[in-house]
Image (tube, helix red, strand yellow):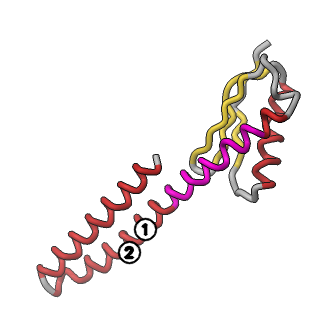
């Protein structure tokens, strides 16, 4: 995923550079478009950087939250199956647990770990309850 974000960023930069060169070759009337492209290019670069930061953060956050869940004796039960993934600054808990109390505990353990890491991620507790 990190490679995809990097490739996207490089492709966007190359496209913006080609557009600038073509606009400059066409003369004075195209300078307004070059300026507009510059602003768009800045926005695309920002989005590419944010995507890479989110990917990098996810690679560090997911295993730490998963470890916190495994270390919790109430959550580390063979009846529970808890998956952890992060995307777009949201930590998703999916799978199933054996009670509503365990579901709530998984959400609070994940939120506490994120809080300790000083990350502004939100927790989406999508765990289902199976008896």
Judge whether residue 61 is colored magenta: yes
Disc 1 to disc 2, how far (Cα)? 6 Å
Mark 1 = which residue? Answer: 43
From the viewer's side, name the closer residue of 2 and 95.
2
On the rendered structure, is 83 left or right of 26? Answer: right
The residue positioned 61% from the left and 53% from the top of the image is 57
**Up-down: is 75 above or below 23?**
above
Q: Measuring 36% from the left and 55% from the top, which residue is drawn there?
A: 8
Label 1 secondary element = helix
Label total for image: 2
Q: Residue at x 64, y 46 (%)?
A: 90
**Contact (Cβ within 8 Å) of mark 1 with mark 2:** yes
- Is 53 situated left or right of 40 in this image? right
User: Which element carries disc 2, helix, strand or loop?
Assistant: helix
Above or below — where is 5 with respect to 95? below
Please report the bounds of the magenta region as a residue range: 50-67
- Residue 62 spot, x, y in % from top left: 66, 43
Image side of residue 26 versus residue 131, left or right: left
From the image, tell me which residue sits under label 2: 39
> Residue 51's x, y, as percent?
50, 56
Q: Is 21 drawn above or below residue 122 in the view shown?
A: below
Q: Specify few, some or many for label 2: CA neighbours under 10 Å numbering under 14, 14-19, or 20 or more.
A: few
Residue 69 quadrant: top right
Quarter occupied by the C terminus: top right
User: From the viewer's perspective, is residue 90 above or below residue 33?
Assistant: above
Secondary structure mainly formed by the magenta segment = helix
Q: Residue at image x 83%, y 41%?
A: 108
């Amino acid at each position: 995923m990190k490679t995809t974000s990097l490739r996207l960023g490089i492709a966007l930069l190359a496209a913006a550079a080609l557009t600038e060169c073509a606009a400059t070759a066409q003369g004075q009337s195209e300078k307004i478009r070059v300026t507009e492209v510059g602003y768009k290019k800045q926005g695309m670069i920002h989005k590419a950087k944010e995507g890479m930061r989110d990917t990098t953060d996810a690679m560090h956050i997911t295993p730490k939250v998963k470890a916190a869940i495994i270390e919790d004796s109430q959550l580390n039960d063979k009846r529970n199956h808890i998956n952890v993934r992060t995307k777009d600054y949201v930590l998703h808990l999916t799978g199933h647990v054996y009670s509503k109390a365990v579901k709530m505990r998984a959400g609070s353990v994940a939120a506490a770990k994120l809080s300790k890491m000083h990350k502004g991620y939100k927790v989406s507790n999508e765990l289902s309850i199976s008896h």
